[in-house]
Amino acid sequence: MSADLGPIGVFGAGAIGCYVGGMLKAAGADVRFLGRDTAVATLQKHGLTLTRFDGPQVTVKPGDIAISSDPSILSACDIILLCVKSQATPEAAVDIASRMKSGACVVSLQNGVENAETLADALGANRVRAGMVPFNVLSSGNGQFHRGTAGDILLADGESTRKLAAFLTRAGIAANTRRDMNEVLWGKLLLNLNNALNVLSDVPLVQQLSNRAYRLVLAGMVEEALRAMRKSRIRPASIGRVRPWLIPHILRLPDWLFLRVARSMLAMDAKARSSMWDDLKNGRQPEIDFLNGAVVRLAENAGMPAPVNRKVIALVHEAFKSGHSPGFSGDELLRLVGSRQV
């Protein structure tokens, strides 16, 4: 079944890389992981145990995993899935450029809206495809990764990505191709604004979204983003069933009504957290400047303010500097960002 794809490289053996790559490997694909020495040691010792909130467990034995900290492991790959944090994209592009085989393509499975453009500048636009992963995966150590939320992977349309989407679907990760990936990425960014809020609240996503005060802060961030997009003539795509323009209104509903209307938003594991929360817990740097920061930059270019996102960015940087979440209540966050602005 993998012969129609050839070797698949996974650049970044973190949560998304290990989950997606591991599912592909378990389904029969030739997958080659590039990771740090710690990831190499972990996977060679423990292999992969992949679980999800709505499906069966999948395992990959240590002896079946091809992984190295040497980028040359990617040199024979036809497709390279880039799964590093956005801040690492420029360095990753340099590593890929000198080893990427002729005819291969890089698929960005990263948060944010700028990664594909950064890669295209270094590798050429014809060798890069944007991708969007809507679900959340967290590591519990020893090669164990848990998918806590729902959604389909979307990939920029092309011959190689159509084959990849088909194989991902066979492997148990529903995937499709799209021709409007720029709009898809901006639509996903709206959802990713909640990553920062999860850092500041330090509660599971379901608990956070079930609290109207937290949702009011999120509504303020999303509304600033939508205003800047509208002024910049960007039409974000719907990610899931909710139209982007309705998100702030739905978030502002009373709790009892939100819980009825927004069931799809709450289709997740009761303990699910954001990837940025996981970064804080594991001493990694946040992607805040590529998520909420992208909103601030877009607003600046459009001549508009974005005070809620600016304040949230500052609070997240303070949390990462201290090494722990402040654990703000929803009411505390409302006061900090200014209730008039949300």
Image: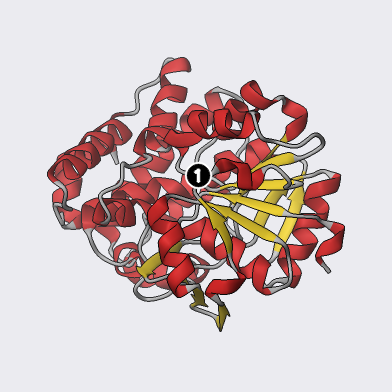
Rendered-image quadrant of the C terminus: top left
Instruction: Identify whether 213 is placed above or below 79.
Output: below
Residue 138 shows in this picture? yes
Q: Amino acid at mark 1?
A: Asn
Looking at the picture, tell me which residue is in the foreground, 186 or 252.
186
What residue do we see at 32% from left, 47% from top? 196
In percent of the image, x 38 and y 56: which residue is there? 38
Name the element at disc 1. loop
Residue 180 in view here: no
Rate crowding at label 1 as few (under 14), some (14 to 19) or many (20 or more) other CA atoms within 10 Å: many
The reply, left or right, for residue 338 in relation to residue 102 is left
Q: Residue at x 31, y 41 (%)?
A: 285
- Name the colouring of the figure: secondary structure
Residue 134 relative to residue 157: left or right: left
Give the image location of residue 338, x and y in percent. Answer: 19, 38
Quickly name the residue at label 1: 111
Foreground residue among 45 and 149: 45
